[in-house]
Image (cartoon, rainbow, N blue to C red):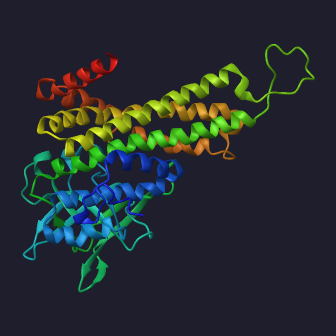
Amino acid sequence: LGLISATRPPEVGGQQLPITVQTMALSYLLAANLSAAGYAFLTTGAAHLVEAFGSDAVRETYMRPMYAGEWTGTMALTEPHAGSSLADVRSTATPTADGHYLIRGEKTFISGGDHDLTENVDNLLLARIEGAPAGIKGVSLFVVPRLRPEGGALVPNDVHTAGMIHKIGWRGLPSVILSLGEDGDCRGWLVGEPHRGIRYMFQMMNEARILVGLSAAATASVAYHEAVAYARERLQGRPLTARDPSTPQVPIIEHADVRRMLLRQKAIVEGSLCLVAMASRYADVAAHGATSEERQRAQLQRDLLTPVAKSLPAERWLEANSLAIQVHGGYGYSSEYQPEAWLRDQKLNTIHEGTTGIQSMDLLGRKVVAGGGAALRAFLEEVGAGVA
């Protein structure tokens, strides 16, 4: 459908739609089936990394099939001993005379790392080049395909699925454990300059964080609409003013407590959608604002709002999904209705792409203090102007 490359420029096969437009369009797909939509937005982020930092040869080989939807992409960061602590990545990359690197290591929780929807999967992977310094400054970014192009065909690239993560939700998007280089022939191609992988990967992580907030908003939105529909149809009880027990029962939406729960869900849904849309709009202005000052100011506010747009919907939408189950009563706690599945899906949004605690540290430890508080000042000025 062209959604994967929708926001990218025409020269790489895109339509250069505003990110805000794509975000709102994607919300419909996430509400319908967030697992299926996950393949698309993971591929968008992976292909954009290659577009932004890869060489011409790497872009031609790996970016174009992803933007075309022929291959999918992943972000392969996490290792069994190091979840969010990317400074402790141990996967290694050994340079060869042929220009590629030999990759060895293990990655876990790799969403979309193995499936048969497309003919190939490209893993945007963090590893250490031999002799690299310790910590974050020694991590590099590579594209490591499951099947590598060779002689006009795709051949196995010594990337093996060592296990599955059995999740409580997001069942349609497999998360796998990848074993790399068991036979000494896992080839990876450097993206960008050595030892700058974390900096590059933050582009994809920041994009993904806004999309996690959108996923949370979409999941709670569809659960809210389901709860409203159920409350209009479910007959139970009578108005407090009814004294005759033979009078007909009324839909539960007429009861004050049910309306309270529905209105709480509605407030969370609309507020979160607005928050994610605003973060997306800042991203658009940061890239295409009329002046450098406008672009810089928008970038500051986008950076400030990214951890908020990820975390607030994830936490509050968990409340909203729980209320959707509550409206359904005992049926909500069964698999006869869908809110229980959406609640299971929803929980992941407080965890992946950086837990709520990590987003808090990012907000207060980096974004608020950056530039002597410039982003926070710009945000307060905008809020003040809106209030005025």
Q: Which residue is situated farthest in the front direction here?
A: 290
Of residues 130 and 385, the one drawn nearer to the viewer in this rendering:
385
Q: Is residue 333 left or right of residue 147?
A: right
Residue 284 image offset from top left, x and y in percent: 26, 44
Residue 3: quadrant of the picture: bottom left
Of residues 130 and 320, the one drawn nearer to the viewer in this rendering:
320
* Up/down of 125 relative to 358, above or below: below
Residue at x 58% of width, y 36% of height: 224
* Up/down of 233 relative to 35, above or below: above
Q: Which residue is situated farthest in the bottom direction here?
A: 151
Residue at x 32% of width, y 48% of height: 19
> How many numbered discs?
0
Any part of residue 314 in sight: no
Residue 194 image offset from top left, x and y in percent: 9, 57
Q: Is residue 130 left or right of residue 83?
A: left
Q: Quadrant of the C terminus?
A: top left
Q: Quadrant of the N terminus?
A: bottom left
Residue 103: quadrant of the picture: bottom left
* Up/down of 153 relative to 136, above or below: below
Residue 50 image offset from top left, x and y in percent: 21, 61
Any part of residue 281 in sight: yes
Q: Is residue 210 left or right of residue 203?
A: right
Residue at x 28% of width, y 43% of height: 84
Q: Is residue 105 left or right of residue 163?
A: left
Residue 133 image offset from top left, x and y in percent: 7, 50
